[in-house]
C-alpha cells in the first residue's frame, strides 16, 4: 500500500512539473506526427469501438483533447452500446490544467455521461462514468476548484475499487495536480510535496505565513499536499 501511494505521488510530481511542457505540446500538436504509447483500457465494447476508446485514452494522456474527442466519437459510431465512448466524450471536454469547460460544454458532457450510464455493463464502467458526472453536476452553481475536489475524491474510490487499474490512478493523480494548479493564484509555486498523509493541506506565502488550501469536508479528505511559494527550500 505504501509503495503504491509513493508511486502515485511520483506520478503526481511528474504531472505537476511537466504541465508547462504539456501546454507547449497542446499548442503545437498540429505540426507534429502522432507518437502515442499503447494503452490497455478494458471495456465491454468490441472491435473498432474498443480500439477507438483506447486511442482516445492515449490522446487524453497526451493532452490532445480534440483528437481524443474524435476517437471517442468514432467509437460511439462503431458501437452505440459502448458506454465508455460516451465517458470519453465527457472527458474530452474537461481540460483540467487549463480553462474549465463552458456551461454549454457541461450540458453536452452530462448528456453523454447519462447515455453512457444507460449502457454501462460493468461496475467499473459505472464507476468511471459516475466520477466524471460528479464533476459536471450542478455545474453553474459549483466553484471550479470544488468540482475538481469532488472528482478527485470519487476517482480515489474508483482506483481503490480497481487497484491494478493504472488508468484510474493516472486520472486520480491528474485531478490532484489540477486542483493544485487551480490554487496557484495564491502564490507562485516553487516546490510541491505529496507526503500523502503527513501534513494538512497548506500554502506558505512570501511572508512565510501558512494558509489552508481548501476547507473542511470534501477538501480535507484529499491526500495532504503542501504548496511552497516564494524562495526555493
Image (cartoon, rainbow, N blue to C red):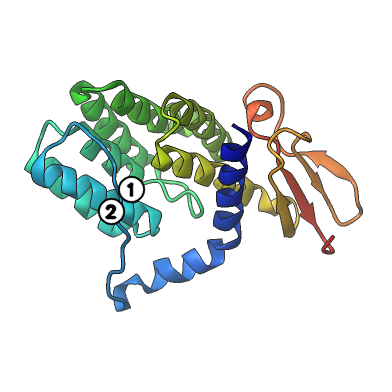
The answer to whether residue 203 is above or below residue 112 is below
Q: Residues within 10 Å of mark 1 (few under 14, many from 20)?
A: many
Q: Residues within 10 Å of mark 2 (few under 14, many from 20)?
A: many
The answer to whether residue 140 is above or below residue 170 is above
Which of the 4 quarters of the picture holds residue 43? top left
Q: Nearer the viewer, residue 208 or 170?
A: 170
| Residue located 21% across and 54% down the image | 70
Q: Residue 9 location in percent, x, y?
A: 61, 45
Q: Do the residues under discs 1 and 2 have CB atoms within 8 angstroms? A: yes
Quarter that holds the N terminus: top right
In the picture provided, is 31 more to the left or to the right than 1? left
Q: Residue 128 location in percent, x, y?
A: 36, 31
Q: Is residue 179 visible?
A: no
Res. 200 mark: none
Q: Earlier in the sequence, mark 1 or mark 2?
A: 2
Q: Is residue 23 visible?
A: yes
| Residue located 48% across and 66% down the image | 23
Q: Nearer the viewer, residue 142 or 68?
A: 68
Q: Residue 28 location in percent, x, y?
A: 38, 74
Per the image, label 2 sits on a secondary structure element best described as: helix
Quarter that holds the C terminus: bottom right
Q: What is the tally of numbered marks visible in this picture? A: 2
Res. 68 mark: 2
Whole-number angstrom distance, CA of label 1 to CA of label 2: 6 Å
Q: Residue 42 location in percent, x, y?
A: 26, 37
* Outermost residue, bottom side: 31
Per the image, label 1 sits on a secondary structure element best described as: helix
Which of the 4 quarters of the picture holds residue 195? top right
| Residue located 39% across and 33% down the image | 132
The answer to whether residue 156 is above or below residue 195 is above
**Mark 1, residue position:** 92
Amino acid at each position: 500500500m505504501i509503495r503504491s501511494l509513493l508511486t502515485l505521488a511520483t506520478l503526481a510530481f511528474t504531472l505537476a512539473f511537466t504541465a508547462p511542457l504539456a501546454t507547449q505540446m497542446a499548442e503545437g500538436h498540429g505540426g507534429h506526427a502522432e507518437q502515442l504509447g499503447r494503452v490497455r483500457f478494458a471495456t465491454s465494447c468490441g472491435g473498432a469501438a474498443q480500439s477507438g476508446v483506447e486511442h482516445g485514452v492515449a490522446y487524453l494522456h497526451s493532452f490532445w483533447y480534440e483528437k481524443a474527442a474524435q476517437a471517442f466519437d468514432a467509437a460511439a459510431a462503431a458501437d452505440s452500446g459502448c458506454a465508455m465512448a460516451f465517458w470519453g466524450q465527457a472527458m474530452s471536454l474537461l481540460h483540467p490544467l487549463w480553462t474549465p469547460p463552458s456551461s454549454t460544454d457541461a450540458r453536452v458532457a452530462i448528456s453523454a455521461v447519462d447515455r453512457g450510464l444507460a449502457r454501462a455493463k460493468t461496475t467499473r464502467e459505472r464507476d468511471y462514468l459516475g466520477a466524471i458526472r460528479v464533476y459536471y453536476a450542478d455545474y453553474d452553481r459549483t466553484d471550479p476548484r470544488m468540482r475538481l475536489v469532488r472528482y478527485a475524491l470519487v476517482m480515489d474510490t474508483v482506483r481503490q475499487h480497481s487497484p491494478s487499474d493504472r488508468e484510474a490512478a493516472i486520472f486520480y493523480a491528474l485531478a490532484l495536480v489540477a486542483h493544485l494548479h487551480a490554487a496557484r493564484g495564491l502564490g507562485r509555486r516553487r516546490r510541491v510535496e505529496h507526503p500523502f498523509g503527513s501534513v494538512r493541506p497548506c500554502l506558505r506565502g512570501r511572508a512565510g505565513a501558512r494558509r489552508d488550501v481548501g476547507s473542511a469536508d470534501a477538501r480535507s479528505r484529499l491526500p495532504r499536499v503542501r504548496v511552497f511559494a516564494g524562495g526555493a527550500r
